[in-house]
């Protein structure tokens, strides 16, 4: 399996705090059947000083540390980009790492604030699409506005966005409301991929098999595997 959204890279955001934690997370991922993890540190100007030019060397260093420890996990660099005008400036400067590309569009993991869908989000997304950047919206099932009214996310899918649901949400790790929202999105064929959004070993581990199995119970084995293998592979094949 391929994990498109993870915070395994140490000392860059609210994910792994040090190398030991990163190695532990990597071991958990491999044990779960994940062979490739896209590291997606928060790209959130004003909060984290992450951008493509200062992350590349850290990912290469971490890959070397995984190889030295005998942990068979392949790493790719991506980023979880906060919806903001400051992030747009980083995109224009070429400092935002994309997940890959499909059909002539670069695929970018985009995060809304957890509490709401900001005013102007649709215009922001239209600007990205005009730049041939397709947003993959991270964990919409955990957004309070979407949990209150799941159909609110449909306008973004109709515009051309894809949705990434957290595997743990479908498995019930984030509570009943997130699970019911995730289930609704999946049953309505609005979800493109599943990913872990892993931050730590105890509460938010890099595990996607439980979510895959939950999706399989909802819409079938083939579609569930496509969300953790087929579609992610198409994205990173052109990274």
Image (cartoon, grey):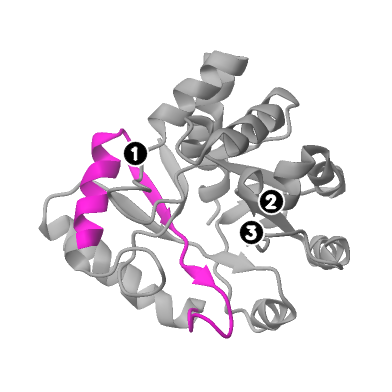
Q: Position of residue 172 (x, y in %)?
A: 48, 32
Provide residue 150's location: percent of width, then percent of height.
Answer: 77, 39
Is the residue 67 above or below the residue 218 in the image? below
Which x, y percent locates residue 212?
A: 47, 27
**Image position of 101 (left or right of 59):** right
Which mark sits nearer the N-terminus, 3 or 1? 1
- Name the image quarter holding residue 32: top left
Q: State which quarter of the image contains the N terminus.
A: top left
Q: Secondary structure at mark 2?
A: helix
- Numbered disc 3: secondary structure: loop
Q: Give the crowd class for mark 2: few <14, some 14-19, many >=20 residues within 10 Å.
A: some
Q: Which mark is residue 98?
A: none
Which residue does the image show at 36% across and 39% down from the upper left? 207
Identify the image quadrant of residue 176.
Answer: top right
Which mark is in front, 1 or 2?
A: 2
CB within 8 Å, label 3 to label 2: yes
The total number of labels drawn is 3
**Outermost residue toward the left in this view:** 69
| Lateral position of residue 13 relative to residue 126, left or right | left
Of marks 1 and 2, which one's residue comes earlier in the chain?
A: 1
- What label sits on residue 144 in the rendered view? 2
SS for dot 1: loop
- Graded by Cα atoms within 10 Å as few (under 14), some (14 to 19) or many (20 or more), the crowding at tag 3 reads some
Q: CA distance from mark 1 to mark 2?
A: 29 Å
How far across and down, in percent of the image, does residue 202 sit? Answer: 28, 48
Nearer to me, 236 or 113: 113
Residue bearing mark 3: 114
Location of residue 56 (image quadrant): bottom left
- How far apart marks 3 and 2 lie (CA) works out to 6 Å
Q: Which residues are magenta?
A: 21-50
Q: Which residue is mark 1?
A: 34
């Amino acid at each position: 399996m391929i994990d498109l959204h993870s915070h395994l890279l140490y000392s860059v955001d609210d994910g792994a705090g040090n190398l030991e934690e990163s190695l532990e997370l990597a071991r958990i991922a491999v044990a779960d059947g994940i062979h490739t993890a896209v590291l997606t540190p928060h790209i959130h100007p004003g909060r984290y000083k992450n951008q493509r030019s200062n992350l590349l060397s850290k990912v290469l260093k971490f890959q070397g540390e995984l190889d030295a420890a005998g942990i068979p996990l392949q790493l790719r660099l991506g980023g979880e980009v906060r919806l903001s005008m400051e992030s747009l400036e980083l995109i224009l400067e070429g400092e935002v790492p994309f997940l890959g590309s499909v059909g002539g569009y670069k695929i970018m993991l985009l995060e809304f604030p957890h509490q709401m869908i900001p005013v102007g989000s649709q215009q922001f997304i239209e600007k990205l699409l005009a730049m041939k950047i397709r947003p993959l919206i991270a964990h919409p099932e955990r957004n309070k506005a979407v949990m209150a009214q799941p159909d609110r996310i449909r306008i973004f899918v109709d515009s051309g966005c894809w949705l990434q649901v957290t595997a743990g949400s479908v498995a019930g790790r984030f509570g009943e409301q997130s699970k019911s929202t995730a289930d609704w999105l999946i049953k309505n064929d609005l979800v493109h991929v599943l990913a872990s959004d892993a931050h730590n070993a105890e509460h938010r581990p890099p595990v996607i098999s439980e979510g895959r199995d939950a999706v399989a119970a909802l819409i079938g084995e083939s579609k569930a595997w496509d969300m953790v293998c087929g579609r992610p592979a198409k994205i990173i094949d052109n990274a």
